[in-house]
């Protein structure tokens, strides 16, 4: 073979490798994005899980793959395999136990150490470090085999989740409600690791306390919610995975998907399909977002927004109770957008006033700044008719995926 022919074969082989790399979806192991946009079009049809609420999203490739602050999707929780069509995230399933030997199966979504967050593919939440207040966090040690032993905290998954809306003209508040899982007085997802060389808090929501044999019958998705968290769609200790449903929301006008795992109020827990964890009431909630000691960020929950599945401004609890879709909550800062992210969110109920409704001012808000603007105009109040403010409810909502 001549030298020129050999060089040509080398160039062809290199081109083939480059072409294969260009054609193969580099992040297919991380996220299933669904159909892409048309060539030269940066807009595509939204995937099935969010289509009733959003009709279009950013297509691929997106500038955010170069810099996450640019426009486009960002996988925030790198350990998650995201299926946008189904609206699910599959995460590593962690093994643990209580001191009495009761099995504990959990996920890790956030840590207060940036290096460990990068190592485990989870969110960095520095503000969560202020969560060492009262019983808002609990302790754990990591054993030689990598399993966790928790000092306290147990969850009862036997209750049956139920929310019965109020009458047709006033579906909120619900006539009846029951969270589908309830933590004891010491259960919290915030876990301090005692045998770490550096102080670290992990957000480690418990998804089951059943036996390994029981859970291995649920690998294909036929889950028993009397034994697992209500957001679980499949769980498999054999494969070390758990699949959970995601919730659509907004932050600074960008749609995001997040998990919702615990709340410190039984009504909020029932509405969020989350575990009622009363211990989270010990988290500070009345400080400003960036204050020393503040461990939570703000989430705006609209109560009486516009309704109707075909209404592009549909939003809120009344809509969720009547239309069957999520409330489209508005979250504060998340990674890639702001510095004050925490998976613990202080709930700001937003009630549109009669004046706002009469004048047709209601619309779908997608930023906490918009809610603040409407509040200063007197168009939004709190549940009791007072000023728009945090009211003491805390919900654990780790962010997973930034859609745009």
Image (cartoon, grey):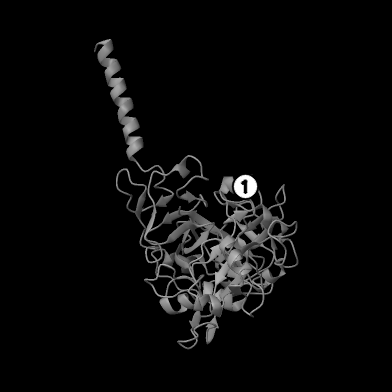
Q: Quadrant of residue 26?
A: top left
- Closest to the observer, 132 or 151: 132
Q: Residue furthest top?
A: 2
Q: What quarter of the picture does the N terminus occupy?
A: top left
Residue 298's spot in the image, x, y percent? 62, 63
- Closest to the observer, 399 or 362: 362
Left of 387 or right of it: where is 239? left
Residue 67's spot in the image, x, y percent? 51, 41
The residue at 69%/63% (across/down) is 137
Q: Disc 1 marks which residue?
A: 116
The residue at 39%/43% (across/down) is 61
- Closest to the observer, 387 or 77: 387
Disc 1 is placed on an element classified as helix
The residue at 30%/30% (across/down) is 16
Q: Is residue 257 visible?
A: yes
Q: Quadrant of residue 378?
A: bottom right
Residue 377's spot in the image, x, y percent? 61, 69
């Amino acid at each position: 073979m001549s030298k020129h022919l050999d060089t040509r074969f080398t160039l062809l082989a290199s081109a083939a490798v480059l072409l294969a790399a260009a054609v193969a979806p580099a992040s297919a192991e991380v996220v299933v994005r669904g159909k892409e946009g048309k060539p030269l079009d940066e807009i595509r049809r939204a995937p099935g899980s969010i289509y009733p609420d959003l009709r279009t999203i950013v297509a691929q490739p997106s500038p955010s793959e170069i810099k996450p602050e640019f426009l486009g999707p960002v996988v925030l929780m790198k350990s998650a395999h995201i299926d946008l069509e189904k609206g699910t995230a599959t995460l590593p399933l962690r093994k643990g136990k209580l001191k009495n030997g009761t099995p504990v199966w959990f996920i890790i979504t956030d840590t207060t150490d940036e290096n460990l967050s990068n190592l485990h593919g989870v969110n960095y939440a520095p503000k969560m470090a202020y969560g060492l207040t009262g019983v808002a966090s609990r302790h754990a040690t990591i054993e030689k085999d990598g399993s966790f032993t928790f000092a306290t905290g147990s969850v009862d998954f036997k209750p049956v989740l139920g929310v019965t809306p109020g009458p047709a003209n006033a579906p909120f508040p619900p006539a009846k409600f029951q969270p589908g899982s309830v933590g004891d007085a010491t259960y919290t997802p915030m876990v301090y690791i005692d045998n770490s060389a550096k102080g670290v808090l992990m957000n480690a929501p418990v998804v089951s306390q059943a036996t390994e044999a029981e859970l291995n019958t649920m690998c294909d998705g036929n889950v028993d919610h009397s034994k697992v968290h209500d957001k679980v769609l499949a769980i498999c200790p054999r494969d070390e995975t758990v699949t959970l449903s995601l919730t659509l929301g907004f932050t600074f006008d960008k749609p995001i998907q997040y998990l919702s795992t615990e709340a410190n109020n039984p009504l909020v827990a029932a509405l969020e399909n989350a575990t009622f964890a009363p211990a989270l009431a010990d988290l500070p909630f009345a400080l400003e977002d960036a204050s020393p000691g503040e461990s939570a960020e703000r989430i705006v929950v609209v109560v009486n927004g516009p309704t109707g599945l075909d209404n592009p401004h549909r939003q809120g609890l009344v809509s969720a109770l009547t239309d069957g879709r999520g409330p489209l909550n508005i979250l504060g800062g998340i990674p890639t957008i702001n510095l004050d992210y925490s998976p613990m969110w202080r709930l700001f109920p937003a009630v549109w006033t009669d004046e706002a409704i009469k004048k047709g001012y209601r619309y779908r808000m997608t930023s906490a700044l918009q809610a603040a603007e409407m509040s200063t105009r007197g168009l939004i109040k709190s549940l009791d008719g007072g000023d728009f403010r945090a009211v003491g409810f805390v919900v654990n909502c780790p962010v997973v995926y930034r859609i745009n």
